Image (tube, grey):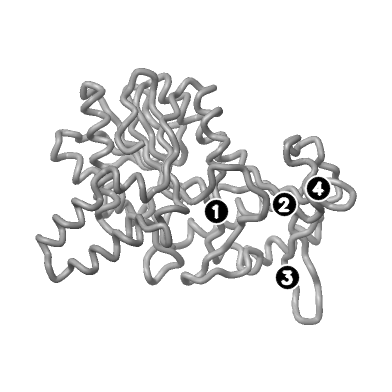
Amino acid sequence: MDTKARFARLIAATGPISVAQFMAESNARYYDSRDPLGRAGDFITAPEVSQMFGELIGLWLADVWDRAGRPGPIHYVELGPGRGTLARDALGAAQRFGFVPQIHLVEASRALRSIQRGMLPHAIWHDDFSSVPDNGPLLIVANEFLDALPVRQMVRTAAGWRERMVDLERSDAGDRLVPVAGSRPMDAAVPAALAAAAEGAIIETCPAAAAVVDDLARRLAAQGGAALMIDYGYTVPAHGSSLQALRAHTKVDPFAHPGESDLTAHVDFSVFPAIAQNAGAHWIGTIEQGAFLIALGLGARVQSLGKAAPAQAEAIRAAAHRLAAPDAMGTLFKVMGLAAPGWPTGAGF
């Protein structure tokens, strides 16, 4: 039974399900069954755009580790590592400066694990972050990981705030899944600053992302290390649904192809500083991806690669534009840094 049929049967039997449940189960099925990356997949992430992205991340990690006194054992941890391209490029650049950590990949997808094994045969895989070792500092990277975690949506109705649910709409043209307002009052769950929003307004929260940041911050505070979390999102709270679906590099109805399209939502970076600091870590800052990469030396790397491969110079410049330009990934994507108390803040912030 495909995911849509499973949801239809569940809703027919028990009633509408939350958007959060819909997103969580859809993405679990989606990621476990395929390689979603690249031209033949549904989307392309920054590491697949150019090696420069991973190389600059690797240099950032090596620099932080070096300025911290080169402690060991040191662990490289990546959440949602895709094909392993980011880890390969980052660690390849970092090892030139003596940074050769134990590699830990937090990956639930069986399909992607098989690809990662070919790229990083010496890595250790984990189903979740809890099994990552606690015997040394952690240098953590999460690129486009938080956006795939399930969001909870609240919608303002004439009767007050309700959780946004997914229901089954039956018609002669065929059954389809549609968003609806739930029946239970949820006014107490809405922040006071947003409670008076107009009818039809939608707000999103992501408890799963908050829990991830809390976990990482607590481990950093206890073990030492630093983290980079890179994703598309916003730094000021906002109204509106950001839930979207990609299929074959095209935006589609998020409710039309559960388990067959990539469901994501914009990340609310504004809530993370307080979470990290309450857990004992230092929030370094949150900066636009373009500004971060340029500060790390993207321009110099473009020139260096262009001189080494003149025939590829234009493609290299185009890739850098895609990574850093405001009209591409440069502004929409954000980079958040965390560090253990006493550790360097890292370049670029």
| Distance in Å between CA atoms under marks 3 and 1 | 20 Å
| Distance in Å between CA atoms under marks 1 and 2 | 25 Å
Extreme residue in the left direction? 308
Name the image quarter holding residue 71.
Answer: top left
Amino acid on which the number 3 mark rests in the picture: Arg
Q: Horizontal and vertical percent for residue 112?
A: 39, 55
Amino acid on which the number 1 mark rests in the picture: Ala
Q: List the residue tagged with mark 4.
A: 162
Sequence-first tag of 1 and 4: 1
Depth order, front residue of 76/303:
303
Q: Secondary structure at mark 3?
A: strand
Kindly identify which numbered label has been placed on residue 343: none
Nearest to viewer (mark 4 / mark 3): 4
Q: List the residue tagged with mark 2.
A: 202
| Distance in Å between CA atoms under marks 4 and 2 | 10 Å
Q: List the residue tagged with mark 3.
A: 176
Residue 246 drawn above or below residue 283? below
Depth order, front residue of 72/52:
52
Q: Secondary structure at mark 2?
A: strand
Task: State the residue at coordinates (55%, 53%).
Answer: 28
| Distance in Å between CA atoms under marks 2 and 3 | 22 Å
Amino acid on which the number 2 mark rests in the picture: Ile
Amino acid on which the number 4 mark rests in the picture: Arg
Sequence-first tag of 1 and 2: 1
Q: List the residue tagged with mark 1.
A: 28
Contact between labelled residues 1 and 3, with CB atoms less than 8 Å apart: no
Q: Horizontal and vertical percent for residue 25?
A: 61, 53
Residue 135 drawn above or below residue 213? above
Q: Quadrant of the C terminus?
A: top left
Q: Horizontal and vertical percent for residue 190?
A: 75, 39
Q: Secondary structure at mark 4?
A: strand
